[in-house]
Each structure stands twice: as structure tokens, then as C-alpha cells.
Image (cartoon, rainbow, N blue to C red):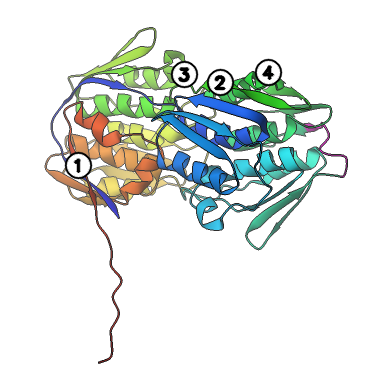
Amino acid sequence: MVKYMIEGGSPLSGRVSISGAKNAAVAMLPATLLVNGVCRIENVPDISDVRLLLEILSDMGASIRRLSRNTLELDCSRVRNATAPIDLVRRIRASYYLIGAELGRFGHACVAMPGGCNFGVRPIDQHIKGFEALGAQVEQSGGYVVADAPEGGLMGGHVYLDIVSVGATMNILLASVLANGTTVIENCAKEPHIVDLANFLNAMGAKISGAGTDIIKVRGVRELRGGAYSIIPDQIEAGTYMAAAAAVGGSVLIEGVIPKHLDCITAKLREMGARVTEYDDAIRVESVRRLRRANVKTMPYPGFPTDMQPQIAVCMALAEGTSLVTEGIYDNRFRYTGELNRMGACIQVESKTAVIDGVRELHGCEVRACDLRAGAAMVIAALAAGGTTIIEDAHYIERGYEDIIGKLAGLGAHIRRVETYEVATADVAG
């Protein structure tokens, strides 16, 4: 069991460097299954989701070398078409990218239904729709997704996504790069990590055009070769430190970012009264007075990201006036609001909208991280609160934030990580 203990009330000051994008890395690593050669990937975030995927790939026969903390070499040319260990797959949502990658490489995939954070029903029906458009037969049985390509291999097809889905867009990309013919995907998600995955695949020899727009075209190729690639900075990690600076107060320079990817977050923090200054590859956030109320509705990129919803809610919980947060992507992503209310926030949830009446201060207490981004929100709230906060289930946070303890401590936060071990005992008859 992992806990964070945080003594709040001190402003943040200094600079923090942003790691590689989690949501790009967790698709790019399965994508290496499609490559006949060595992939050198730089700026890989050292987070638990990445470590799990590396363990899965290693178990399948991949050769993996860690050249530095954030640089890996992967050679999947000798990987066997094996079912990934169910105990690992069920601990990470992004394991569903193994379906598209294995289907594209081997013509067959058998992958356990994915795990990860639980904040509502997140079906993979759009993924399956895409695989079937390429000619695959897909069944869900016994907690597994089993997909098989036709005898001649996957064929290019036309896919119209019923909803804008990041996961489905990326998974169909993985399945289609080695297919025969051209695949057209319409109503695609446009997030930066989708563009990054497409750029990675193109660097390995794929022919993908249109990533970042509504329509992506994939012209199938016979083979992907090895090469080198560097992952983009993590938009959500950067946004989390921006929200922390705004909510807690102080002045923080967030380095190694792509400011354009943060436009919607920058605009909202400015609206709330924080000072945000953009540089070529950095952003400074300064906050010296109480924030103002605002309204947010989460939407697909370039709208406000659902993965920043809990963090901006902490800013609103401390802002003057009544704010509204409307969740436009997932159901049941407001479970964290009960934890914030334990700290003195005043939040009421009605269906997909949270009504937040700002309070002047929060107080430390024991709370839990309900999921990855909710955990990040608890950290921000704890840093802003008076007294000591203990965050239970902090392992969720480490799924997506590299060295969050060290980075926050470098900004002056009083935070430490505590591991506790539960020892099973049994009565012994004498």
C-alpha cells in the first residue's frame, strides 16, 4: 500500500521539467510489436503503466534494453504470438492496444479485457467495429477479446467512429498499418498523442496521413523497420503542475512543454485570474490572489481534456463564487468530489455536472485517490490545504506521473511517500 503524506499551506516556487506523454508511450510500446527491427524510443516516462507494458512485452519474448532512465531499445522481431499474462493486463487500461498490434502482426490476438482506472463504463465497441471493418472476426468470451484476421490477412477498409474515441483511433491505426490496401478512419480523435503515435509509425516506415484531423488515411505497407523516435511532452502532466501553481499559489516555470497543446488549460487559468506566460518550450504560472469562478465542459481535443477535470475542480473549489464543471466524455468521473468535500470543499454533483461553491480554505485529513487523475487532484488539494493530508491508494498516481514526489519537493512542497505492507497471518493449532 502506497500513501502520500503532505503538509500543505506553502506556496510553490521554482521550475519543473515535464516527462514524456503517458498516453503516447502506452500505445507506442505495443506498436513496437509491428516493427521488424530495433526501436530506440527516447523520453519514455518512468511510470508504473510503462513498467507493466514492458513486463508484458518481455514475457512475450521482446528484447528490451534500458539505455537510461528514459531511453529504451526494444526488439520485438522474435516475439511469439502468446496470450499476455492476465494478472498484468488487468492492471492497465492501455493493454487493449495489444489487440490491434497483435492482430496486425500475427493475424490473431487473444487479450484479457483491460483494467486501469474505474470511472464509468468504457466499452471497446468502437475498437471492435474498426477491427471488423478490416475483415477480422472478433469475439468476447470468458473475459478475453479474441480477434482473427481472414486467411489472406487484414484488408483496408472504411471506419466511421460513432463517437470520438482516442483509444479506438489509435488501436485501428495499429491494426491497419500492415493491412493490404488503404484504410480510412473518419470522426477520429485529434489528441496530440494520436499524432505522436502516427509520427512514430511513419518513422518506422508506415504511410499514415491526416493524423490530428477528422479523417486519417492509412496505406498499408509490407513491413515496418527499426528506427529512433522521441515521445512528445505530457500535456496532462504539464496541466497538472499548472493547476497546482494556480491553486496553491506561487510562481512555477514548467519546462519542456509544447505550449500549443496547453492552450485550453492556459485560457481557463487566465480566465480564473492566474498569470500565465508562454515561452518557446516552457510556461510560467503565477498566482498571488484568490482565483475567480469559471465554467468548464470537458470535450475531445482541442477542447478542455477530461483528464484535467479533477485538477481544475480543485482550483474552482478554492475560487471566489460558484463554478460549474460538466463532464462531456465519461460517466461517473466525479467520485473524487466526496474526498474534496471531506477536506472542506462544497461540491454537489447532479448527473454529469458538478456545482462548486468556492471556499476560502481546505483542511488536511485522510483521503484516497480514486483513480489516476483524481489522485493528482488530491495532491493539489493537499498542497493548498492547512495541516497534514494523508492520501491512500497513491499507487494510482504513479500510473501516470514520473517522480511526482521529487518534482514537487523541488518546488518547495512538503511531501513524502510511505509504503506499508499487509502481512497475512493464520492461526496455528498447537
Q: Which residue bears the numbered disc 4?
A: 210
Of tags 1 and 3, the one toward the viewer is 1
Of tags 3 and 2, the one toward the viewer is 2
Of tags 1 and 4, the one toward the viewer is 1
Find numbered disc 4 in the image and state the secondary structure of the residue it sits on.
Answer: loop
Q: Which residue bears the numbered disc 3?
A: 261
Q: Amino acid at mark 4?
A: Gly
Distance, label 2 to label 1, CA atoms, is 36 Å
State the residue at coordinates (35%, 26%): 294
Q: Which residues are magenta?
A: 151-158
Disc 4 crowd, CA 10 A, few/some/many (<14, 14-19, 20+): some
Q: Residue furthest right?
A: 152
Image quadrant in which the C terminus is located:
bottom left
Q: Nearer the viewer, residue 304 or 354?
A: 304
Q: Which residue bears the numbered disc 1?
A: 416
Residue 57 is at least partly visible in this image: yes
Mark 4 or mark 2, which has the lower sequence index?
A: 4
Distance, label 3 to label 4, CA atoms, is 18 Å
Distance, label 3 to label 2, CA atoms, is 23 Å
Q: Amino acid at mark 2?
A: Ala
Of tags 4 and 2, the one toward the viewer is 2
Distance, label 4 to label 2, CA atoms, is 22 Å
Q: Which residue bears the numbered disc 2?
A: 228
Mark 3 or mark 2, which has the lower sequence index?
A: 2
Distance, label 1 to label 3, CA atoms, is 31 Å
Q: Nearer the viewer, residue 413 or 1?
A: 1
Report x, y in % for residue 56: 54, 47
The quarter holding residue 323 reads top left
Find numbered disc 1 in the image and state the secondary structure of the residue it sits on.
Answer: strand
